[in-house]
Image: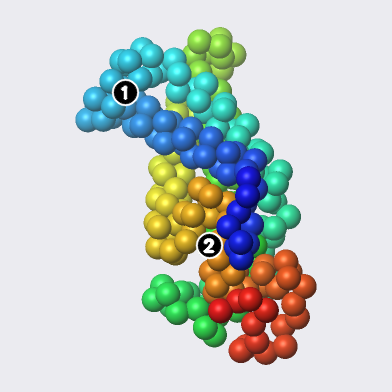
Amino acid sequence: MIYPEGTVLRYATVTRVNHWITAICFVLLTLSGLSMFHPIFFFLSALFGGGQWTRAVHPWIGIVLALSYAGLVYQFWRDNFWTPDDTAWVRKFDLILVNEEEGVPEVGQFNAGQKFVFWAMALLIPVLLFTGLVIWEVYFSAFTPLVVQRIAVLLHSLAAIAAILVWIVHVYAGIWVRGSMQAMTRGYVTPGWAWRHHRKWLRGLTGARSPGPTSRPEGVP
């Protein structure tokens, strides 16, 4: 794919495809899971062909989600280690909330909020996967006592609620920070966007040093 001149590649095609497979699976799991969670949401099962089909496809979608997210973990786990800069970034969160990032520590490939989402999902998705396997009656009911299944249902539900909340934060942040959606749909960002939101990452790409707060790499407005 040819990117517009003067832009910066943020996410390769394989990464974007991986991300959207994960996202689509998560939305489908949320809808199908809610339809089985409480009768008030049962109408959502119509999206999957009814209650029986919903119950049948839900765990398979979960397996695809787990495999897909494993691909994201493989690609980005090194870039999501917590650093002292992330702690300093969190302390300036009041400025970030009002979209004022001057005076905020420079950010690398991912900021502290993105790292939180990454590791939260890296924890919650395996919990959902393993508890889901325990309560997958078609294949595993003969190997798990009823009390274990009940505990697994509780843990599965709690983990699902937590994952949905994390997902809401992730989507809201992606919409709030203008240009983020373009990065994940088209793969590129402007140098100005990279300078404002992920300055340390841009410096790494351009080889620029960090001589002062007002210095800018060539070509960055």
Few, some or many C-alpha atoms within 10 Å of disc 2 (few <14, some 14-19, many ≥20)? some
Give the residue displayed 56% in from the left and 79% down from the top.
221
Quarter-wise, where is residue 198 in the image? Answer: bottom right
Residue 1, image x, y percentages: 63, 45
For mark 1, give the secondary structure.
helix
The residue under the point 28% across, 20% down is 46
What amino acid is labelled 2 in the image? Gly
Quarter of image, res 143: top right
Q: Is residue 26 left or right of residue 73?
A: left
Residue 75 lies, with reference to residue 104, above or below; the image says above
Q: Residues within 10 Å of mark 1 (few under 14, many from 20)?
A: some
The residue at 36%/32% (across/down) is 31
Of marks 1 and 2, the one in the foreground: 1
| Left or right, 6 with reference to 25 | right
Mark closest to the chain's N terminus, 1 or 2:
1
Residue 194 location (% of width, % of height): 58, 68
- Labelled disc at residue 107: none
Q: Which residue is mark 1?
A: 47
* Above or below, 203 relative to 26: below
Q: How is the image coloured?
A: rainbow
- Residue 38's place in the image compared with 95, above or below, is above
Q: In the rendered image, which residue does mark 2 sit on?
A: 113
Is 182 placed left or right of 110 in the picture? Answer: left
145 or 189: nearer the viewer? 189
Spatial CA distance of label 1 from label 2 is 33 Å
Measured as percent of width and height from the top left, residue 102 is found at 52, 83
The front one of 8 and 32 is 8
The residue under label 1 is which amino acid type? Answer: Leu
